[in-house]
Image: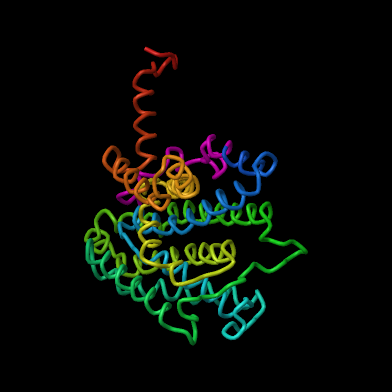
Amino acid sequence: MAVAGEARLPAGSASGGWLARVPPALWVLALLALLMPAFANNFILFQVFGWTFILGMIALSLMFLAGYGGMVSLIQMTVAGLAGYLVAILGPSGTEQVSLGLPWWINIPAAVLIATFFGTLVGALAVRTEGIYTIMITLAIAAAFFYFTRQNYTIFNGYSGFSLVVPPQLFGIDWRQPVAFYYLTLGCALLSYAAVVYVARSPFGLALQGVRDNARRMAALGYNVVWHRILAYGFAAVIASFGGILLVWQNAQIAPGTAGLPAVIDILVIAVVGGLRHPVGPFIGAFIYVLLSSFAPDILQALGLAPDRFKLIVGIGFLAVVYFSPDGVLGLWERAMARRRNRTDPLTGLPR
């Protein structure tokens, strides 16, 4: 049964195998990503692209909720932060007086399960509201988590957090080395992207989009609107959890500021700037954000300005993108392609 919102799926999704439905541009990007270590230095691999993939995954979980479910949640960075904290608490770290030192095959699944349960529980509370009330509930929980981790020393080690939290050396590989970590984050990002695309085209995903467009109609058709929304929060929490684990491995530490209110807002900015209509949007937004975060302070310092004002540049860029394209950078791209098609003869493909 077709539901409202299905028209947003890319053309050609109704026929052919999934390989045939992948846009050629994505194949080119995938090839470039695989070959990136051949011509990029360690800083680009580890800091720029590694951070991009991680933030993109967390923002992707927000995009799934907002783009396919119509629910703007500010809890995704908190879910990621909880998963990162749990890996540090349950696994080994430099804070031995608090960490339990359990092996990776226990602490990683446990961290994902607990963080996913937390995200689903928050979703069960948030789905009973709409619009600004959903945003305020999730923002309040995110703020509460930040202050709780900063003040609790028994479990979260308070303001200091945890240090020396590194990935396990599986298959004899140090996964925190730039090339290995690049491929680790790239693989997780691709799996997250594929999972979102698959779920969005599944019966559950199509029903969720129907709920987004007309909840009353879907309820009249026999769909459980509340449970579809709660399960959407659970699925998004899984993606955010893995992103949070990768984030703490990249930084080798975690503190309350990792999931603080500025970080919560940053994920919203990344998702909106990239675009909420397609799963690739969050990764585009994350790449732009990481470039600004990595290089804008140096540019400002060269201009004689305070380096910490790079957030001002991020804010101005956010306002500009939202003003000119509410659909983010992807919206600008789609409009540019539409103008190009209008200037091209549909029969010959030549300019008119």
Foreground residue among 245 and 134: 245
Q: Is residue 139 above or below residue 69?
A: below
Q: Is residue 292 above or below residue 176?
A: above
> Where, by quadrant of the figure, is residue 230 drawn?
bottom left
Instruction: Please give the name of the residue rendered at 31% of the width and 68% of the height, measured from the top-left corner.
Output: 138
**Residue 241 screen position, x and y as percent:** 50, 67
Instruction: Please give the name of the residue rendered at 35% of the width and 18% of the height, measured from the top-left corner.
Output: 343
Magenta stretch secondary structure, dominant: loop
Going by the picture, which residue comes out furthest to the right?
172
Instruction: Please give the name of the residue rendered at 37% of the width and 76% of the height, measured from the top-left corner.
Output: 147
Foreground residue among 277 and 10: 277
On whether residue 3 falls in the magenta region, the answer is yes
Q: Is residue 322 above or below residue 132?
A: above
On whether residue 90 falls in the magenta region, the answer is no
> Where, by quadrant of the figure, is residue 127 drawn?
bottom left
> In this rendering, would 26 be left or right of 343?
right
Report the number of discs: 0
> In this rendering, would 198 be left or right of 73?
right
Quarter of the figure with the C terminus: top left
> Where, by quadrant of the figure, is residue 119 drawn?
bottom left
**Residue 164 screen position, x and y as percent:** 62, 71
Look at the image and give the residue range highlighted in magenta: 1-28
**Residue 6 screen position, x and y as percent:** 35, 47
**Residue 121 screen position, x and y as percent:** 38, 76
Foreground residue among 1 and 316: 316
